Image (cartoon, rainbow, N blue to C red):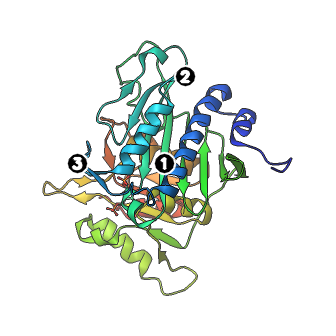
Amino acid sequence: MDEHDVTLSRHVLIREGTRAPVTDLALILERIALIGKLIARQLAHASIRDELGYTGDTNVQGEKVKWLDEWTNQVFLKTFAHGFPVCSLVSEEMEEVHHRPENCRENSYAVLYDPLDGSSNTDVNGALGTIFSIRRRAPGHGTKIDDILHPGTEQVAAGYILYGPATQLVYTAGNGVDGFTLDLGLGEFVLWRENLRMPRLGSTYAVNQGNLSKWHPGARKFIEHITSRKDKSTSYSLRYTGAFVADFHRCLLEGGLYLYPGEVTSEGKSKGKLRLMYELAPLSFVAEQARGKGSTGKGRILEVNPSAIHERQPVYIGSALEVDLAEQMRVEG
Ligand code: AFP
Protein backbone atom coordinates (compact mmCIF):
# COMPACT_ATOMS: atom_id res chain seq x y z
CA MET A 1 0.00 0.00 0.00
CA ASP A 2 1.29 3.41 -0.96
CA GLU A 3 1.37 6.00 1.83
CA HIS A 4 -1.12 8.04 -0.20
CA ASP A 5 -3.63 5.19 -0.60
CA VAL A 6 -6.81 5.78 1.37
CA THR A 7 -8.97 2.87 2.47
CA LEU A 8 -12.78 3.03 2.41
CA SER A 9 -13.11 3.03 6.21
CA ARG A 10 -10.67 5.90 6.56
CA HIS A 11 -12.25 7.86 3.73
CA VAL A 12 -15.78 7.54 5.14
CA LEU A 13 -14.58 8.99 8.44
CA ILE A 14 -13.09 12.10 6.80
CA ARG A 15 -15.99 12.76 4.38
CA GLU A 16 -17.72 16.06 5.11
CA GLY A 17 -21.36 17.08 4.65
CA THR A 18 -22.84 13.57 4.97
CA ARG A 19 -26.51 12.96 5.78
CA ALA A 20 -25.74 10.81 8.82
CA PRO A 21 -22.90 10.89 11.37
CA VAL A 22 -19.74 9.52 9.76
CA THR A 23 -19.17 7.18 12.70
CA ASP A 24 -22.52 5.44 11.99
CA LEU A 25 -21.81 5.35 8.25
CA ALA A 26 -18.36 3.92 8.83
CA LEU A 27 -19.82 1.05 10.89
CA ILE A 28 -22.39 0.18 8.21
CA LEU A 29 -20.19 0.68 5.14
CA GLU A 30 -17.38 -1.31 6.68
CA ARG A 31 -19.78 -4.27 6.92
CA ILE A 32 -21.08 -3.75 3.40
CA ALA A 33 -17.45 -3.73 2.22
CA LEU A 34 -16.89 -7.03 4.06
CA ILE A 35 -19.98 -8.46 2.33
CA GLY A 36 -18.53 -7.29 -1.02
CA LYS A 37 -15.24 -9.06 -0.32
CA LEU A 38 -17.01 -12.30 0.70
CA ILE A 39 -19.23 -12.23 -2.39
CA ALA A 40 -16.30 -11.44 -4.73
CA ARG A 41 -14.39 -14.40 -3.30
CA GLN A 42 -17.39 -16.69 -3.61
CA LEU A 43 -18.04 -15.63 -7.24
CA ALA A 44 -14.43 -16.36 -8.13
CA HIS A 45 -14.70 -19.96 -6.88
CA ALA A 46 -18.36 -20.88 -7.41
CA SER A 47 -17.83 -22.65 -10.74
CA ILE A 48 -14.96 -24.81 -9.38
CA ARG A 49 -17.06 -25.78 -6.36
CA ASP A 50 -20.08 -26.51 -8.53
CA GLU A 51 -22.12 -23.83 -6.70
CA LEU A 52 -23.92 -22.29 -9.68
CA GLY A 53 -27.43 -22.92 -11.06
CA TYR A 54 -30.87 -22.90 -9.39
CA THR A 55 -31.99 -23.95 -5.91
CA GLY A 56 -35.38 -25.14 -7.16
CA ASP A 57 -37.24 -22.42 -5.15
CA THR A 58 -39.14 -19.36 -6.40
CA ASN A 59 -38.73 -15.98 -4.64
CA VAL A 60 -41.30 -13.38 -3.59
CA GLN A 61 -41.10 -11.85 -7.09
CA GLY A 62 -42.06 -15.17 -8.71
CA GLU A 63 -38.52 -15.60 -10.08
CA LYS A 64 -36.53 -18.84 -9.89
CA VAL A 65 -33.91 -18.54 -7.15
CA LYS A 66 -30.30 -19.15 -8.01
CA TRP A 67 -27.98 -20.79 -5.53
CA LEU A 68 -25.88 -17.61 -5.39
CA ASP A 69 -28.98 -15.39 -4.79
CA GLU A 70 -29.65 -17.38 -1.64
CA TRP A 71 -26.00 -17.50 -0.58
CA THR A 72 -25.46 -13.73 -0.98
CA ASN A 73 -28.65 -12.95 0.95
CA GLN A 74 -27.45 -15.15 3.81
CA VAL A 75 -24.16 -13.23 3.85
CA PHE A 76 -26.08 -9.99 4.50
CA LEU A 77 -28.15 -11.60 7.24
CA LYS A 78 -25.12 -13.07 8.98
CA THR A 79 -22.96 -9.96 8.64
CA PHE A 80 -25.65 -7.72 10.12
CA ALA A 81 -26.82 -10.27 12.69
CA HIS A 82 -25.00 -8.71 15.61
CA GLY A 83 -24.54 -5.21 16.75
CA PHE A 84 -25.90 -1.73 16.48
CA PRO A 85 -26.77 0.38 14.40
CA VAL A 86 -28.63 -1.71 11.75
CA CYS A 87 -31.96 -2.99 13.01
CA SER A 88 -33.86 -3.82 9.80
CA LEU A 89 -32.94 -5.51 6.54
CA VAL A 90 -35.03 -5.40 3.37
CA SER A 91 -33.94 -7.72 0.55
CA GLU A 92 -35.08 -8.65 -2.93
CA GLU A 93 -34.82 -12.23 -1.70
CA MET A 94 -37.11 -11.91 1.35
CA GLU A 95 -40.83 -11.29 1.29
CA GLU A 96 -40.87 -9.63 4.72
CA VAL A 97 -38.56 -7.16 6.43
CA HIS A 98 -36.03 -8.88 8.67
CA HIS A 99 -35.94 -7.06 12.03
CA ARG A 100 -33.33 -7.19 14.77
CA PRO A 101 -35.37 -5.61 17.60
CA GLU A 102 -32.40 -5.73 19.97
CA ASN A 103 -30.59 -3.26 17.66
CA CYS A 104 -33.56 -0.84 17.38
CA ARG A 105 -32.77 2.21 19.46
CA GLU A 106 -32.18 5.91 18.86
CA ASN A 107 -30.10 6.46 15.70
CA SER A 108 -30.59 3.08 14.15
CA TYR A 109 -30.86 2.28 10.47
CA ALA A 110 -32.40 0.01 7.84
CA VAL A 111 -30.33 -1.45 5.01
CA LEU A 112 -32.26 -2.25 1.83
CA TYR A 113 -30.43 -4.33 -0.74
CA ASP A 114 -30.37 -6.47 -3.84
CA PRO A 115 -27.63 -8.94 -2.85
CA LEU A 116 -26.94 -10.20 -6.37
CA ASP A 117 -28.04 -7.96 -9.20
CA GLY A 118 -27.97 -9.48 -12.69
CA SER A 119 -28.16 -13.07 -11.48
CA SER A 120 -28.88 -14.36 -14.99
CA ASN A 121 -25.14 -13.74 -15.50
CA THR A 122 -23.95 -16.12 -12.75
CA ASP A 123 -23.68 -19.20 -14.96
CA VAL A 124 -21.88 -17.42 -17.82
CA ASN A 125 -19.21 -15.60 -15.80
CA GLY A 126 -20.80 -12.22 -16.63
CA ALA A 127 -20.82 -8.98 -14.62
CA LEU A 128 -22.78 -8.94 -11.35
CA GLY A 129 -23.52 -6.41 -8.66
CA THR A 130 -24.83 -5.69 -5.17
CA ILE A 131 -27.00 -2.62 -4.54
CA PHE A 132 -27.59 -1.03 -1.12
CA SER A 133 -29.59 1.80 0.38
CA ILE A 134 -29.30 3.07 3.96
CA ARG A 135 -32.22 4.74 5.71
CA ARG A 136 -32.81 5.97 9.23
CA ARG A 137 -35.29 4.12 11.41
CA ALA A 138 -37.59 6.31 13.45
CA PRO A 139 -37.21 5.63 17.19
CA GLY A 140 -39.91 3.38 18.64
CA HIS A 141 -41.10 2.02 15.30
CA GLY A 142 -39.87 -1.50 16.08
CA THR A 143 -41.30 -3.86 13.49
CA LYS A 144 -43.62 -1.29 11.82
CA ILE A 145 -42.27 -0.28 8.43
CA ASP A 146 -44.09 2.98 7.66
CA ASP A 147 -40.88 4.88 8.49
CA ILE A 148 -39.05 2.88 5.79
CA LEU A 149 -41.76 3.32 3.15
CA HIS A 150 -40.68 6.87 2.30
CA PRO A 151 -39.43 8.45 -0.94
CA GLY A 152 -35.80 7.95 -1.94
CA THR A 153 -34.98 11.54 -0.93
CA GLU A 154 -34.87 10.18 2.65
CA GLN A 155 -31.91 7.87 2.00
CA VAL A 156 -28.83 8.81 4.03
CA ALA A 157 -26.44 6.81 1.86
CA ALA A 158 -26.60 4.42 -1.07
CA GLY A 159 -24.36 2.71 -3.56
CA TYR A 160 -23.31 -0.47 -5.25
CA ILE A 161 -20.55 -3.02 -5.65
CA LEU A 162 -19.64 -4.15 -9.15
CA TYR A 163 -18.04 -7.59 -9.58
CA GLY A 164 -16.24 -7.30 -12.92
CA PRO A 165 -12.60 -7.78 -13.82
CA ALA A 166 -12.08 -5.69 -10.68
CA THR A 167 -14.44 -5.38 -7.70
CA GLN A 168 -15.42 -1.75 -7.18
CA LEU A 169 -17.57 -0.06 -4.55
CA VAL A 170 -19.25 3.26 -5.35
CA TYR A 171 -21.30 5.19 -2.80
CA THR A 172 -22.79 8.52 -1.86
CA ALA A 173 -23.72 9.83 1.56
CA GLY A 174 -25.35 12.96 0.13
CA ASN A 175 -22.30 15.01 -0.70
CA GLY A 176 -20.78 13.61 -3.89
CA VAL A 177 -19.94 10.15 -5.16
CA ASP A 178 -16.72 8.29 -4.39
CA GLY A 179 -15.40 5.07 -5.91
CA PHE A 180 -13.10 2.40 -4.42
CA THR A 181 -11.37 -0.63 -5.93
CA LEU A 182 -10.74 -3.85 -4.03
CA ASP A 183 -7.00 -4.37 -3.73
CA LEU A 184 -6.85 -8.17 -3.63
CA GLY A 185 -3.36 -8.30 -2.10
CA LEU A 186 -4.37 -5.96 0.70
CA GLY A 187 -7.95 -7.18 1.11
CA GLU A 188 -9.12 -3.56 1.31
CA PHE A 189 -11.20 -1.20 -0.82
CA VAL A 190 -8.83 1.60 -1.76
CA LEU A 191 -9.89 5.05 -3.01
CA TRP A 192 -10.02 5.11 -6.80
CA ARG A 193 -12.02 8.28 -7.69
CA GLU A 194 -13.38 11.08 -5.55
CA ASN A 195 -16.36 13.22 -6.57
CA LEU A 196 -17.30 11.25 -9.67
CA ARG A 197 -19.24 13.32 -12.22
CA MET A 198 -21.45 11.81 -14.87
CA PRO A 199 -21.06 13.39 -18.34
CA ARG A 200 -24.18 15.41 -19.33
CA LEU A 201 -24.49 13.31 -22.49
CA GLY A 202 -23.15 9.94 -23.62
CA SER A 203 -22.98 7.81 -26.73
CA THR A 204 -24.43 4.49 -25.48
CA TYR A 205 -27.82 3.27 -24.28
CA ALA A 206 -28.61 0.08 -22.37
CA VAL A 207 -31.96 -1.65 -22.74
CA ASN A 208 -33.50 -5.07 -23.34
CA GLN A 209 -34.71 -4.11 -26.80
CA GLY A 210 -36.30 -7.54 -27.24
CA ASN A 211 -39.21 -6.15 -25.18
CA LEU A 212 -39.89 -3.23 -27.57
CA SER A 213 -43.30 -4.45 -28.71
CA LYS A 214 -44.55 -4.46 -25.08
CA TRP A 215 -43.74 -0.78 -24.37
CA HIS A 216 -45.78 2.40 -24.48
CA PRO A 217 -45.58 4.00 -27.99
CA GLY A 218 -43.65 6.91 -26.41
CA ALA A 219 -40.79 4.61 -25.38
CA ARG A 220 -40.75 2.99 -28.83
CA LYS A 221 -40.58 6.41 -30.50
CA PHE A 222 -37.78 7.45 -28.18
CA ILE A 223 -35.66 4.44 -29.19
CA GLU A 224 -36.44 5.07 -32.85
CA HIS A 225 -35.41 8.70 -32.38
CA ILE A 226 -32.02 7.96 -30.77
CA THR A 227 -31.17 5.11 -33.14
CA SER A 228 -32.03 6.93 -36.38
CA ARG A 229 -29.17 9.45 -36.18
CA LYS A 230 -26.75 9.00 -39.03
CA ASP A 231 -24.09 11.46 -37.92
CA LYS A 232 -21.38 9.54 -36.02
CA SER A 233 -20.94 12.33 -33.48
CA THR A 234 -24.56 12.12 -32.28
CA SER A 235 -25.42 8.47 -32.92
CA TYR A 236 -25.76 5.85 -30.16
CA SER A 237 -24.42 2.35 -29.65
CA LEU A 238 -26.31 -0.29 -27.68
CA ARG A 239 -24.52 -1.80 -24.65
CA TYR A 240 -26.55 -4.15 -22.43
CA THR A 241 -25.09 -6.59 -19.92
CA GLY A 242 -28.23 -7.82 -18.11
CA ALA A 243 -26.88 -6.38 -14.85
CA PHE A 244 -28.20 -2.93 -13.91
CA VAL A 245 -25.11 -2.16 -11.83
CA ALA A 246 -22.72 -2.83 -14.73
CA ASP A 247 -24.78 -0.80 -17.21
CA PHE A 248 -25.21 2.03 -14.73
CA HIS A 249 -21.47 2.07 -13.99
CA ARG A 250 -20.75 2.67 -17.67
CA CYS A 251 -23.22 5.59 -17.65
CA LEU A 252 -21.61 7.02 -14.53
CA LEU A 253 -18.14 6.98 -16.08
CA GLU A 254 -18.84 7.66 -19.76
CA GLY A 255 -22.37 9.08 -19.85
CA GLY A 256 -25.36 7.46 -21.53
CA LEU A 257 -28.70 6.03 -20.53
CA TYR A 258 -30.02 2.83 -18.92
CA LEU A 259 -33.72 2.25 -19.44
CA TYR A 260 -36.19 -0.46 -18.53
CA PRO A 261 -39.53 0.86 -19.83
CA GLY A 262 -42.81 -0.35 -18.37
CA GLU A 263 -44.70 -3.17 -20.04
CA VAL A 264 -48.20 -2.08 -21.01
CA THR A 265 -50.76 -4.43 -19.44
CA SER A 266 -54.12 -5.45 -20.91
CA GLU A 267 -55.71 -2.73 -18.65
CA GLY A 268 -53.47 -0.15 -20.34
CA LYS A 269 -51.23 0.33 -17.26
CA SER A 270 -47.45 0.52 -17.48
CA LYS A 271 -45.72 -2.10 -15.28
CA GLY A 272 -42.03 -1.68 -14.46
CA LYS A 273 -39.65 -4.55 -13.75
CA LEU A 274 -36.97 -3.04 -11.52
CA ARG A 275 -37.56 -2.59 -7.82
CA LEU A 276 -37.93 0.93 -6.46
CA MET A 277 -36.59 0.64 -2.92
CA TYR A 278 -33.39 -1.37 -3.43
CA GLU A 279 -32.52 -0.89 -7.11
CA LEU A 280 -33.91 2.38 -8.47
CA ALA A 281 -33.85 4.70 -5.45
CA PRO A 282 -30.23 3.92 -4.49
CA LEU A 283 -28.85 4.26 -8.01
CA SER A 284 -30.91 7.43 -8.59
CA PHE A 285 -29.36 8.89 -5.44
CA VAL A 286 -25.90 8.06 -6.83
CA ALA A 287 -26.87 9.43 -10.29
CA GLU A 288 -28.13 12.74 -8.89
CA GLN A 289 -25.12 13.17 -6.65
CA ALA A 290 -22.95 12.73 -9.76
CA ARG A 291 -25.05 15.33 -11.69
CA GLY A 292 -27.09 12.70 -13.57
CA LYS A 293 -30.79 11.93 -13.27
CA GLY A 294 -33.16 9.05 -12.53
CA SER A 295 -36.76 9.13 -13.78
CA THR A 296 -39.77 6.83 -14.06
CA GLY A 297 -40.36 8.52 -17.41
CA LYS A 298 -42.96 10.70 -15.72
CA GLY A 299 -40.93 12.20 -12.90
CA ARG A 300 -38.06 12.00 -10.45
CA ILE A 301 -37.57 8.50 -9.01
CA LEU A 302 -36.39 9.90 -5.68
CA GLU A 303 -39.81 11.54 -5.15
CA VAL A 304 -41.90 8.42 -5.72
CA ASN A 305 -43.86 7.54 -2.58
CA PRO A 306 -43.60 3.75 -2.26
CA SER A 307 -46.67 1.76 -1.37
CA ALA A 308 -44.84 -1.54 -0.80
CA ILE A 309 -41.24 -2.62 -0.15
CA HIS A 310 -41.08 -4.67 -3.36
CA GLU A 311 -42.74 -2.03 -5.58
CA ARG A 312 -41.54 -1.90 -9.21
CA GLN A 313 -41.30 1.12 -11.52
CA PRO A 314 -40.19 1.88 -15.09
CA VAL A 315 -36.74 3.52 -15.19
CA TYR A 316 -34.75 5.97 -17.32
CA ILE A 317 -31.45 6.75 -15.60
CA GLY A 318 -28.11 8.23 -16.58
CA SER A 319 -26.91 11.44 -18.20
CA ALA A 320 -29.15 14.41 -17.42
CA LEU A 321 -29.78 15.48 -21.03
CA GLU A 322 -30.82 11.98 -22.11
CA VAL A 323 -33.19 11.53 -19.17
CA ASP A 324 -34.69 14.98 -19.92
CA LEU A 325 -35.21 13.99 -23.55
CA ALA A 326 -36.95 10.74 -22.54
CA GLU A 327 -39.34 12.68 -20.27
CA GLN A 328 -39.99 15.30 -22.99
CA MET A 329 -40.87 12.51 -25.43
CA ARG A 330 -43.45 11.21 -22.91
CA VAL A 331 -41.97 7.72 -22.90
CA GLU A 332 -44.48 6.46 -20.34
CA GLY A 333 -47.47 8.44 -21.62
P1 AFP B 1 -31.98 -9.62 -10.76
O1 AFP B 1 -31.55 -8.66 -9.71
O2 AFP B 1 -33.17 -10.42 -10.35
O3 AFP B 1 -30.87 -10.44 -11.23
O4 AFP B 1 -32.55 -8.75 -12.01
C1 AFP B 1 -31.69 -8.07 -12.82
C2 AFP B 1 -32.36 -6.81 -13.33
O5 AFP B 1 -33.18 -6.24 -12.34
C3 AFP B 1 -31.32 -5.79 -13.81
O6 AFP B 1 -30.10 -5.90 -13.16
C4 AFP B 1 -31.18 -6.05 -15.29
O7 AFP B 1 -30.80 -4.94 -16.04
C5 AFP B 1 -32.55 -6.55 -15.66
O8 AFP B 1 -33.14 -7.08 -14.46
C6 AFP B 1 -32.47 -7.62 -16.69
O9 AFP B 1 -33.74 -7.99 -17.08
P2 AFP B 1 -33.98 -8.76 -18.48
O10 AFP B 1 -33.39 -10.11 -18.31
O11 AFP B 1 -35.49 -8.78 -18.59
O12 AFP B 1 -33.34 -7.95 -19.55
Q: What is the CA distance from the residue labelled 3 to the residue labelled 1?
A: 20 Å
Q: Secondary structure at mark 3?
A: loop
Does label 2 point to a residue whose CB lies under 8 Å from ligand 1?
Answer: no
Q: Nearer the viewer, residue 183 or 127?
A: 183
Q: Residues within 10 Å of mark 3 (few under 14, many from 20)?
A: few
Quadrant in the rendering for residue 206: bottom left
Query: Of the residues shown, which amino acid type is indicated by label 1?
Result: Thr
First reached walking from the N terminus: tag 2 or tag 1: 2
Residue 207 coordinates in the image, percent (x, y): 39, 67
Q: Please determine whether, in this image, residue 257 is positioned above or below residue 18.
A: below
Query: Of the residues shown, which amino acid type is indicated by label 3?
Result: Gly
| Location of mark 1 (residue) | 130
Does label 3 point to a residue whose CB lies under 8 Å from ligand 1?
Answer: no
- Residue 62 numbered tag: 3
Residue 38 coordinates in the image, percent (x, y): 54, 45
Q: Is 298 left, or right, of 293 in this rendering? A: left
Taking the view exactly as shown, the residue that stands out farthest to the left is 266
- Write the residue at 39% across / 54% down: 51
First reached walking from the N terminus: tag 3 or tag 2: 3
Q: Please determine whether, in this image, residue 81 is positioned above or below residue 225.
A: above
First reached walking from the N terminus: tag 3 or tag 1: 3
Which image quadrant shows ligand 1? bottom left
- Write the residue at 59% across / 55% down: 167
- Residue 108 numbered tag: none
- Residue 85 numbered tag: 2
Query: Of the residues shown, which amino acid type is indicated by label 2?
Result: Pro
Q: Residues within 10 Å of mark 2 (few under 14, many from 20)?
A: many
Taking the view exactly as shown, the residue that stands out farthest to the front is 49
Residue 156 coordinates in the image, percent (x, y): 55, 33
Q: Nearer the viewer, residue 20 or 154?
A: 20
Taking the view exactly as shown, the residue that stands out farthest to the right is 3
Q: Secondary structure at mark 1?
A: strand
